[in-house]
Image (cartoon, rainbow, N blue to C red):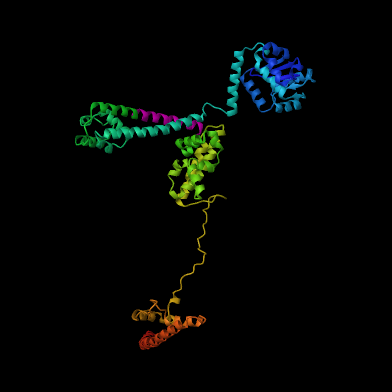
Amino acid sequence: MLVLFETAAGYAIFKVVDESKLEEVDSIWKEFETPEKANKVVKLKHFEKFQDTTEALAAATALVEGKISKNLKKVLKKIAAKEAHEQLAIADAKLGGVIKDKVNLTCVHNTMVTELMRGIRNQIDGLITGLSGREMAAMSLGLAHSLSRYKLKFSPDKVDTMIVQAISLLDDLDKELNNYVMRCREWYGWHFPELGKIVTDNLAYCKCVKAVGDRVNFAAFDLSELLPEEVEAEVKAAAEISMGTEVSEEDINNILHLCDQVIEITEYRTQLYDYLKNRMMAIAPNLTVLVGELVGARLISHAGSLLNLAKHPASTVQILGAEKALFRALKTKKDTPKYGLIYHASLVGQTAPKNKGKISRMLAAKAALAIRYDALGEDTNAELGVETRAKLEARLRHLEERGLKRISGTGKALAKADKYQHKSEVRTYDPSGDSTLSSVPKKRKFEEVEEEEEQPAEVKVKKSKKPKIEPVEEAEEQEVEEPPKKKKKKKRESKAAEEEEVLEEAPTTSTAEEPSKKKKKKKKAKQEEEDD
């Protein structure tokens, strides 16, 4: 039996001297306790050395992928020509199938072979002569690094871990800087409270305090390098009439130390921001052009790495950072959020509120493409990002101007929007049913309006139990429509008596109104004759 063993230095082929010692799998390790015992079990038959690290990397990559390299194929063909009847023990079953197809050698892979490989690896220094342990370790380390770079597509310029750390540190610096500045303003405010309202910039405030110290020195100190002339004059005027308390020199010294810390942290933050900007342009140039270096860095940090971010779809990129709001909306069955970290991008910020959702969706779709291009592409230019941003800006202008263009076709013609027509049937209230008067022709409408102004309110009869009584005509209609009921006859008789009284009063009013109507008709007829 032959054994194929791969090392960092080259391929080694061993021949098993005594196969009887390999029958008991559990006791194979005892045969490889020392180099002398190992040499009694296996002996080196052939060793094919790698010329350089590139060849070793190519061979290792081929073995990982289950393929045969050119050098290994030559070695196996030589063995197959001499000892074709021998079996070949290998560590990978997939590789055995390829060797059998191409070289026509019978390959073996089982638990016994695994234990045998473990024993050979244990005593490799004693089995292969001419290679020291230190050289083998150096070769193994170099090959391991090269293989890792190949598998992870590693490049020193594309280290997204640095971006994750830099953006996290930048956020921490902002928090600490804010706390320090607030403490400095509050502390020095006991001595000179007016300065905090006049000088709003934090860095300028700390530099003024550090340069001057006690407020008494403001009158004679030149602040032209730190403040504009108008602000400087206002500060000097306020220092003379300040209502602050007096403090000792020791207190002023501690405040000055705090100002030094604020100035140093601010300078370091500026330096860190420049570093982050350069790293983002080197690692993800297209994403940086689209959403900016800070938003891009936060997206990478939130996903864990650029490669993980490239695996996310556009819909996930859009709401990345708003997971809490998303799950709350899903739980309460309300509207899901439209944007997460991408909301802070400049394109979304300059959009009107009604179009923010549309722009964030389009920006997320283009950003997902840019991320994949940056993570998996070989080019390091930002042409894709520049072109995409120009398209998004044009689309944003169209949305602002309400000039939406067709997506399909040539895209030159404006979209034709049909006029909206409300097709649902709406039933309006008919007030004619409220009137108790008979229907009047159209010619008499004008007269009717005048009559209604002159006439008193409708006749209403008060009941003892109910405050209002319906008019007479409606009451008569109800009597006709409603079927007679047997119960409560006494109440009905009393109602009938009341209605008879109303009917007696009604004609008197109508007779009084008739002569006035006739006079108006005659006047109108005379006017029409004169007009003719």
Q: Which of the 4 image quadrants contains residue 70?
A: top right
The residue closer to the viewer here, 209 or 107, is: 107
> Which is more toward the observer, 30 or 488?
488
- Say if residue 71 shows up in the picture: no
Q: Is residue 283 magenta?
A: yes
Quarter occupied by the N terminus: top right
Where is residue 512 shown, x and y percent of the image? 35, 88
Quadrant of the rendering where the C terminus is positioned: bottom left
Side of 85 where 425 appears, left or right: left
Name which residue lies at 72% across and 19% down: 3
Which percent across, then down, holds residue 388?
Answer: 51, 41
Q: Position of residue 79 (x, y in %)?
A: 76, 18
Compared to residue 447, the image places residue 171 above or below, namely above
Q: Nearer the viewer, residue 497 or 530?
A: 497
The structure residue drawn at horizontal position 39% and vertical position 88%, both measured from the top left corner, is 504
Residue 223 pos. (x, y %): 25, 31
Which secondary structure class fits the magenta region best?
A: helix
The segment highlighted magenta reads 263-284
Which quarter of the figure has residue 234? top left
Residue at the extreme right of the image, as rendered: 85
